[in-house]
Amino acid sequence: MPKSFRRNRTFWVVAIQTAIVNFYLGGFGSAQSLLRADQGTSLTVAGLHGTAMGVAAILAGYANPHIAHRFGRVRAGWIGLTIFSAGLTLFVVSPPVFLTLPATFITGVGTSIVINTMLTSLSHHYGKAAEVAIPQANAISSVGFVSGTALIGTIAIFFPHLWRVGLLLALPVAIAVFVFGRNKDVDEHVPDIEGPQGGKLSGVFWISWIGFVACISSEFAVSFWAAALLKERVGSTAAISTVAIVALGTGMAIGRWYTAVVLKSFKLDTQLLTVIAVQFLGFAAFWLSHSMLISLISLFIIGVGVSIQFALASIRLIAFSDGRPDLAIGRTSLGAGIAIAAAPFLLGVLGDSFGISRAYIMVPILILIAFAIVKFVPSHAMKS
């Protein structure tokens, strides 16, 4: 099947749903320095918000086959967006850390359900062309990520104590896409009489799963704490450093839209190895930089590198699942949850102990692990 596709209602609805949750991820992830300043916490305590999101992703991962079985993928996306909206509202109206942590957990559950549903829906809908469709849907979602980062950072510059309010802009967009994007004529979902997808997955799947975890860990370690490293290296304020992370999101958006098209003639594994290598080069330049301009360019390159790793690594896991995509994506969410829970928190702990610059040594190690697993555990099933 050729790697071409038509962007129909299914594509646009799931892409916009994912853009909404990425608006929050872009604003929230890059604003960790702002949150620390508001709450007066250490890097370690602030990193617990990433842990809450990770635990939420783990829960959503275990629930994914059951939600898809009971409600179908279309309704699952709307359920996820509803949970996300409730958690986001709680986060904005609850300033202290003992309330923002559970709010982050609730928001994370909804976010993961939306993202899991996007992967399985587009994979099922487009087949082989999903290798292009999923990254391009993620490119649209990156508009949300970049908008969230830019808006929250800008608000923080002019109104330092109101930056969280900007996150609420996700809610009217969520309502609008539900009212105008929902397909009222879709057939009622009938649960499979055989029950939710289950069973054991192969050893090759789990080895590749480790590589997936390494990819996501390196991405979230950078997105959560890049502003902190930038602040230390170039002496910028927390608000300006937050805005600067727009370069990362911009690289991700452009990479998701164009990289899959540029590399579509290559095998899936070659595509993934290429973008992992690009991420490594960008990170090396960012880590060594003491210049704002070089740092911004490096963050852009990192963004291009990580842009389609999540999509391609997820497609690899679906290929190793023996025809059980909902189960595979559930386990993918488990891996993403572990990565999101552990990487930002561990980097925060190391940052408190050794400084954020030395702590960042863990990132190239993760990148090399991901590269090695893709190189030595090829996904032959995904050859064109």
Image (tube, helix red, strand yellow):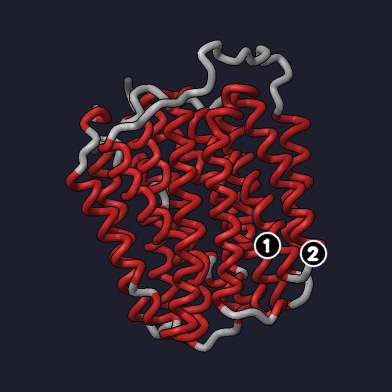
Q: Earlier in the sequence, mark 1 or mark 2?
A: 2
State the image coordinates of residue 39 (x, y, percent, origin top left).
Answer: 71, 77
Q: Amino acid at mark 1?
A: Leu
- Looking at the image, is 179 positioned above or below residue 101? above
Task: Give the number of callouts.
Answer: 2
Q: Nearer the viewer, residue 28 or 307?
A: 28
Residue at x-position 48% and y-position 76% = 349
Q: Nearer the viewer, residue 104 or 285?
A: 104
Q: Nearer the viewer, mark 1 or mark 2?
A: 1
Q: Between marks 1 and 2, how big is the CA–CA gap?
A: 10 Å
Q: Nearer the viewer, residue 115 or 329?
A: 329
Residue at x-position 45% and y-position 26% = 198
Left or right of 8, for residue 84: right
Residue 278 can be seen in this image: yes
Q: Amino acid at mark 2?
A: Ser
Residue assigned mark 2: 94
Residue at x-position 54% and y-position 44% = 140
Left or right of 284, for residue 168: right
Q: Quadrant of residue 18?
A: top right
Residue 247 can be seen in this image: no
Left or right of 115, for residue 251: left
Residue assigned mark 1: 101
State the image coordinates of residue 248 (x, y, percent, origin top left).
Answer: 47, 63
Where, quadrant-wise, is the C terminus in this rendering? top left
